[in-house]
Image (cartoon, rainbow, N blue to C red):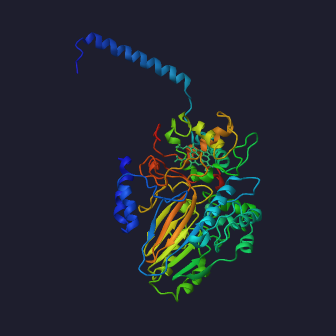
């Protein structure tokens, strides 16, 4: 390690650093929430999330939804993926062997809708997809993030 | 380090199993890192040999196992019909070899009489003697009415070439989870049919009456003579949250413990699964319909896990069973799969080895989650 000999330069650097940090701090504060989160607020956030998890859980277990048709075989995702096992959300994005391309979880959800389920692809940014994603991630929470793994 | 876990399991597994000629052969292949595809029998692959070592001597014979066809009505799903038909015609084509065929349950998907009749129709393809035990999917719409009408009641027993053969009902005796909650017949069946559901409770078991029957059925049988028990669900605690096993397995083991040569052959798990508890060997059979992933906790170390399944290939990870009772009273078992490779050993190829980073939670949508 080379030591910095010029004390003047060092002082200047620290001064600049302080100013810029202060600046960042002020800007951030301006954009952030001013109230701290009470238990009720946090519960509302959780409820909003869990509502999606439950919707996704039902879709994953074959419940119908207007405007989509995820299966033409009678099969639901959960029949092959109990507890959303072997879906491996923690491994995405990755090179997906079945598609021979780099893929996201949403890509592979649609692939499984089309292949084993012989259903119709859903909107990758639509309500059903987000709910499925919520359920799949929730069921696999605690799994070790390992993107790219086969 | 996680990468090596599975390899360590293999080493252990090699050391645990009794070395009989065929397991030794298989294990040698395994040690060489090869995937065991074995030799071909006609257009089938001879894929696995699992053996149940016994002391007694008898006459050798073979039988076939087919289960878990999960038929839907014809208009809805042709794929499962195709696979069931393939299994039945393969059994029939080898019919001379088999003394009988066992159908191990889950003929239907939702217990619908239409599905059960369709199954009975397809089963006519097989003209050798057939024996039947029910699965939960056959039962919970009309509580066994259609099933019993077509295939007769369970349990049953007969002696065949020195082996006492027993078929039990491990599905139809669930504690009543429907009346108090006012479920319709379809709701009752729906909850039962979800493997990862919570509403049907721990439904699998033999129950007191049937355990007494089992006990008296065995009572006049020599303790060293071979016994084969067919059940839909296994006689050991393999993964409680998925309702894979009979809840009264301890009581059942107490009953069978004095017999030194008991093999339990079961369906329901839709995957190769093998275990030994006391003197009992347990062999899990394939479905023809679809394969299930292994339980999150993995498999007993003496199970050779199946290869990760290709979800784009309907004939992958499924098939039927070809069993041979040797003159030395060993049950040799072959998984009759429709794809060349069956067992996966390296982490990336194994149906369990690839799941070292996976942690799962039970579902909640069917538990009436209220937000706290
Ligand atoms: Fe089944
Ligand atoms: Fe079953």
Picture quarter with ligand 2:
bottom right
* Of A78 and A26, the residue lying toward us: A78
Q: Residue at x 62, y 64 (%)?
A: B93
Front residue of B330/B211: it is B330
Task: Answer yes or no: is residue B244 visible.
Answer: no
How far across and down, in percent of the image, does residue B130 sit? Answer: 64, 73
Residue at figure coordinates x 63%, y 57% from the top left: B289
Task: Say which of A8 and B102 sits in front.
Answer: B102
Residue A55: x and y, percent? 67, 45
Q: Residue at x 37, y 69 (%)?
A: B18
Against B247, residue B211 (above or below) is below
Residue A25 appears in the picture as rendered: yes
* Number of numbered discs on residues: 0
The residue sitting at the bottom extreme is B220
Q: Quadrant of residue A67?
A: top right
Against B244, residue A88 (above or below) is above
């Amino acid at each position: 390690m080379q030591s910095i000999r010029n004390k003047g330069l060092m002082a200047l650097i620290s001064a600049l650093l302080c100013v810029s940090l202060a600046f960042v701090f002020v800007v951030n504060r301006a954009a952030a929430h001013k109230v701290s989160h009470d238990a009720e607020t946090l519960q509302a956030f959780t409820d909003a999330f869990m509502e999606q998890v439950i919707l996704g859980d039902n879709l994953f277990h074959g419940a119908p939804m207007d405007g989509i048709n995820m299966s033409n075989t009678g099969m639901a995702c959960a029949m092959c993926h109990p507890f959303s096992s072997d879906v491996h959300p923690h491994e995405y994005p990755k090179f997906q062997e079945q598609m021979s391309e780099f893929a996201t979880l949403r890509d592979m959800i649609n692939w499984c809708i089309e292949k084993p389920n012989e259903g119709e692809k859903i909107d990758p940014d639509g309500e059903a997809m987000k709910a499925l994603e919520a359920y799949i991630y929730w069921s696999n929470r605690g799994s070790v993030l390992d993107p790219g793994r086969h | 380090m996680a990468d090596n876990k599975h390899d360590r399991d293999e080493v252990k597994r090699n050391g645990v199993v009794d070395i009989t000629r065929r397991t030794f052969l298989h294990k040698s292949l395994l040690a060489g890192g090869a995937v065991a595809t074995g030799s071909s029998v006609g257009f089938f692959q001879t894929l696995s040999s699992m053996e149940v070592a016994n002391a007694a001597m008898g006459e050798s014979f073979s039988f076939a196992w087919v289960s878990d066809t999960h038929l839907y009505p014809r208009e809805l799903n042709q794929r499962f019909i195709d696979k069931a038909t393939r299994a039945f015609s393969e059994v029939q084509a080898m019919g001379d070899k088999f003394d009988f065929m066992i159908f191990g349950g889950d003929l239907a998907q939702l217990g619908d009489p239409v599905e059960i009749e369709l199954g009975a129709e397809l089963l006519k393809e097989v003209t050798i003697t057939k024996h039947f035990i029910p699965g939960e999917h056959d039962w919970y719409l009309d509580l066994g009415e259609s099933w019993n009408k077509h295939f007769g009641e369970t349990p049953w027993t007969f002696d065949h070439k020195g082996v006492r053969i027993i078929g039990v009902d491990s599905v139809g005796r669930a504690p009543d989870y429907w009346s108090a909650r006012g479920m319709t017949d379809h709701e009752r069946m729906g909850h039962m049919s979800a493997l990862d559901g919570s509403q049907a409770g721990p439904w699998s078991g033999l129950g007191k009456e049937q355990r007494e029957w089992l006990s008296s059925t065995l009572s006049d049988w020599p303790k060293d003579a071979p016994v084969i028990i067919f059940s839909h669900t296994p006689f050991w605690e393999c993964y409680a949250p998925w309702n894979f096993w009979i809840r009264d397995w301890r009581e059942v083991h107490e009953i069978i413990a004095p017999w030194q040569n008991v093999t339990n052959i079961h369906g329901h798990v839709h995957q190769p699964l093998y275990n030994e508890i006391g003197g009992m060997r347990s062999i899990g059979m394939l479905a023809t319909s679809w394969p299930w992933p292994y339980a999150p906790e993995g498999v007993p170390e003496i199970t050779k896990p199946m290869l990760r399944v290709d979800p784009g290939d309907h004939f992958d990870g499924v098939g039927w069973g070809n069993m041979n009772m040797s003159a030395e009273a060993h049950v040799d078992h072959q998984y009759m799969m429709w794809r060349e490779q069956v067992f996966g050993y390296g982490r990336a190829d194994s149906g369990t080895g690839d799941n070292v980073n996976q942690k799962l939670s039970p579902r909640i949508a069917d538990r009436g989650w209220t937000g706290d």
